[in-house]
Image: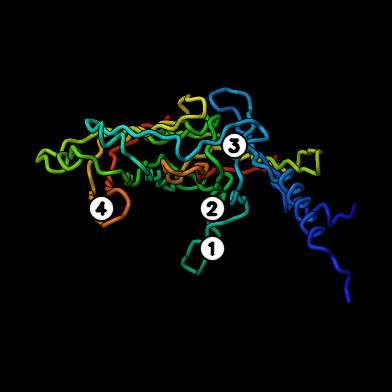
Amino acid sequence: MSAGTNVDQMLRYKGFSVEIEGVDGAPASEDAEWVSVTGGTDASFVVELGPNGPVEGPKLVTLLCLEGPMVAGRTWLAKWLAETALGKDARRDLRVASILKFGAARRRGKATAYKGCRIVHWKASDMDARGTETITERICIVAERAEIA
Amino acid sequence: MGTRVSRRRLLGYGAATAAAVAAHAAPAAAATGDEALRENAFAVEIEGCPEASANVRLVALGGLTVDLPVTGKDRDGYRTYGAGTPRWGATKIALSRGTKGELRSWLEDPKRPRKRISVTIRSKDGDLARSYDLVECFPVSYSEGDLTVGGEANVAELVVQPTRVEAS
């Protein structure tokens, strides 16, 4: 099998899961239901305007957004959202791990650990009494740190 | 001239491709057995309005937004943030207009009492999966919908702003 074929499969099929670590002392749990994870890049710098022109400001992790069907077992998010909604400074550590799938084979790929995450946005799709679709939810997170795990 | 392929054979290719794609691209929820919640598996309870609650057709929950204040940077040069303030958007509820006028009574009440509105989502087994209690809601707008001959049942639309939301 050529390398090009592997790349094609990686692009075609969903190959990641999200691991939530150490929430309330619980062991890491895997949430493979998200269908898209965007952002979360640890390579951005704020550009500030100094007296002599633009200067390099603080380093930041770009906004990390997860989107997918709302599932019954995602209790970690329900609890985190509940705390955030009450105005608590609720922080969690997340780990986004890619699971490479080639047919029936699964292999763990790159993983990024996000530390000190806070929810900054949450939205669910509309609920319709006549509808038959799945409810989707989107969550956006600001992380204080991102490290290749 | 290229090779001719019969229509029957072409359809066979299509079916085989669809089966292969479905095998790889099946929803992850099915793969792990975690149930995706359906958009019609919800219930709404508007405080003091049982008829209106039973007639709700659609709910668009306002989303949560938290503005995080930037507080500076840490020793390694990373930006730091303080605790933010949560803000919930307005929620839209569409419902078949009942006969009791419960919502109109609410809007016409000079005291305009604030109401609690509960939105619950259940799994196929009937277990409570998510709940959003919109606390101390006040009405933002109310429309009794258009009247048309031969159209569907009259659909009213209520938009409320919760003071806070208790999610679980």
Kind of residue indicated by mark 1:
Val
Foreground residue, A17 or A12? A12
Q: Which of the two discs, 3 and 1, labels the residue nearer the N terminus?
A: 1
Give the number of the mark in front: 3 or 1: 3
Report the disc number at residue A58: 2
A84 and B36: which is toward the camera: B36
> What chain does mark 4 sit on?
B
- Do the residues marked 3 and 2 share a common chain? yes
Left or right position of B59 against B80: left
- Provide the residue designation for mark 1: A55
Q: What type is the residue that disc 2 sits on?
A: Pro
* Distance of label 1 from label 2 (alpha carbons): 10 Å
Q: Earlier in the sequence, mark 3 or mark 2?
A: 2
Q: Residue at x 26, y 57 (%)?
A: B148
Q: Could you classify mark 1 by the number of other residues whose Cα lies within 10 Å: few (under 14), some (14-19), or many (20 or more)?
A: few
Residue A7: give x, y in percent of width and height. 79, 54
Q: Quadrant of residue B146?
A: bottom left
Chain where mark 2 sits: A
Q: Between marks 3 and 1, how big is the CA–CA gap? A: 31 Å
Q: Which mark is residue A94?
A: 3
Q: Quadrant of the C terminus of chain A?
A: top right
Q: What element does badge 1 sit on?
A: strand
Chain identity of mark 3: A
